[in-house]
Amino acid sequence: MADASSDGSDIEAENDYVGDSFTVIDANEEWIHEMFESDTDGDEENCDFDGFHEEWIYEEFSQRAKANLFRKRAGLLCVHPEEAGALDYFELFWDLNMWQHIVTETNIYAEQERDKNPPPTYAPHYRPTDIPEMKSFIGLCFGMGILRLPARNDYWRVGKFLFKTNYNHIMPRDTFNLLWRYLHLQNNEELGPQGDRNADKLFKIRWFVNYLNEKFQSVYMPYGQFSLDESMVKFKGRLGFRQYMPAKPIKWGVKIWSVCEADTGYLYNFQIYTGKDNGVQEKGLSHRVVMDLCTPLFGTNACIYMDNYYTGIELFHDLHVHGIHACGTVRANRKGLPNRLLPKNTKLQKHEFKLAQKDELTYCIWQDTKPVLFLSNFHSPDDTGIVSRRNNVRQKVNVTTPSLISDYQMNMGGVDRMDQMIHYYMINHRSHKWWRRIFFSLAMSCAHNAYICAKDEHPIPSMNRWPNFQDFIEDLSEELIGNSRAKKAVKVCNIERPVLEHKVEKIFTKRKVCRECSLAASGKGQRPGATNFGCVQCQIPVHVECQSKHIMRCYSA
């Protein structure tokens, strides 16, 4: 797909200078004023106005003025030196407040869980985490998306030289597993009563989602061309708003409505779909979703491209009123389309097209391999473009089409581009917690947005340092880990218990693997022995000859 160029790339923010400060003009307010300004500065005889069209017209179209330029200052809205690293750009979105929030909620959740369900005496002891340790944890998770192994514990293997990693030098396995278990984003005690129909389905990640949405919109402004589509976060567990979309590469999961920059795939705004509200199917869902996602862009003359699930006459009228240019494919059963140019009433040759116009709307039916319908609220019917297609012998040929078709083909792939990039390096280890999938998906979206910001601010140095997104992720992972190295092995749980003699007697009817033999054989490829004997106090299998080792291990905790 060709790269999209932006009409707003050279447009700077319109400011009024007042004293020592700048006052930003509200784009919505200025755009509304312009609606009522006279546009007859030229020759009056050239200003023909035919009034508003009651019906679709099929010939002698009214020529439209060129679409207004994007009103926002585009690009990265802050300044970094050329030597800025991957972490500097990542922390534009994932800043100190985010780190502190995750650390605080993780420690609270760990305390709640360990009070509710005290771990056994031999379980690893949880030491309250801090920001450097949490950064190392996230950095290791990013690394797992690049270096893929079947199971999480495989990253700490030491038995076979060929399959070793350096994870054990950075963080002990038990520490990582404890952080993985207790990772949390919201205090469960703040949730309403169980079964409350009015409870927020996204309670566990609501703060996280709102925080990132605000950051995505305040750090970087795309160059005026956007695509709107849905993406899927893979999850096959039990979840009330899990979706099945057979046409998507990820068929089962959580649906996220996304608005991305058409050229780069920068995630600008998103909304997680949580299914029916109180068991009632929402009417006008696609209309509501598009208006919600486009609200930050009202009055900016942004160009939004969408597929036929969303496109409709009423929606495009509303977007036009709010200063949004919209274009997309449309389904033949939508209300208000010109009846004469519906597929059932029109027969066209290959790559032939017909047009209709009504007020600000332009409608087109184009015969590709099958009839495709397009609708736009800012394209002129007489403007043309070029699209690439294959002929009968599979050779690429250029086909002349109306400009709304060529622009749609050029700018519709932003969300798919973002999905493609983040799923290349997504950590893919299973979890029963649905929100964890969304958490890591949005974390990777932050990294991808940071990569786009770096390339936008310093294109040549960034491309030399990070030719690919993988290079950026590798540097980001290393910078997150920094100088963090594995500390002394975590102690076993220091729960107060009465001092008893650790007697080893025959307490099991079936033979079980000796705990001490299992620990000694770990990573050496040896098979530990089994026994009917065990520690009466600890209730774990132990050989009689391993009794001294077991006692030493218990009292060294």
Image: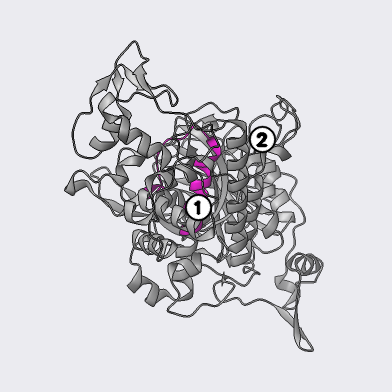
Magenta span contains residue 434? yes
Q: How far apart in space, not on screen, are marks 2 and 1 (Cα)?
A: 20 Å
Quadrant where the C terminus is found in the figure:
top left
Q: Residue furthest top?
A: 509
**Closest to the observer: 176 or 194?**
176
Query: Residue 68: x, y in percent?
Result: 64, 67
Q: Is residue 5 visible?
A: no
Q: Which residue is mark 2?
A: 201
Image position of 540 with respect to 140: above or below = above
Q: Is residue 91 visible?
A: yes
Query: Residue 34: x, y in percent?
Result: 77, 69
Disc 2 is placed on an element classified as loop
Query: Residue 104: x, y in percent?
Result: 62, 52
Residue type at mark 2 is Lys
Image position of 136 with respect to 545: above or below = below
Q: Which residue is mark 1?
A: 443
Residue in view at x 62 percent, y 72 percent: 73
Quarter occupied by residue 221: bottom right
Would you say the residues marked 2 and 1 are in contact, meaning their CB atoms lie under 8 Å apart? no
Magenta span contains residue 388? no
Residue type at mark 1 is Ala
Q: Which residues are magenta?
A: 423-447
Are there few (<14), some (14-19), or many (20+) residues within 10 Å of tag 1?
A: many
**Closest to the observer: 288 or 466?**
466
Magenta stretch, overall SS = helix
Picture mark count: 2
Q: Is residue 480 left or right of residue 199?
A: left
Q: Is residue 16 left or right of residue 89?
A: right
Disc 1 is placed on an element classified as helix
Q: Residue furthest bottom?
A: 19
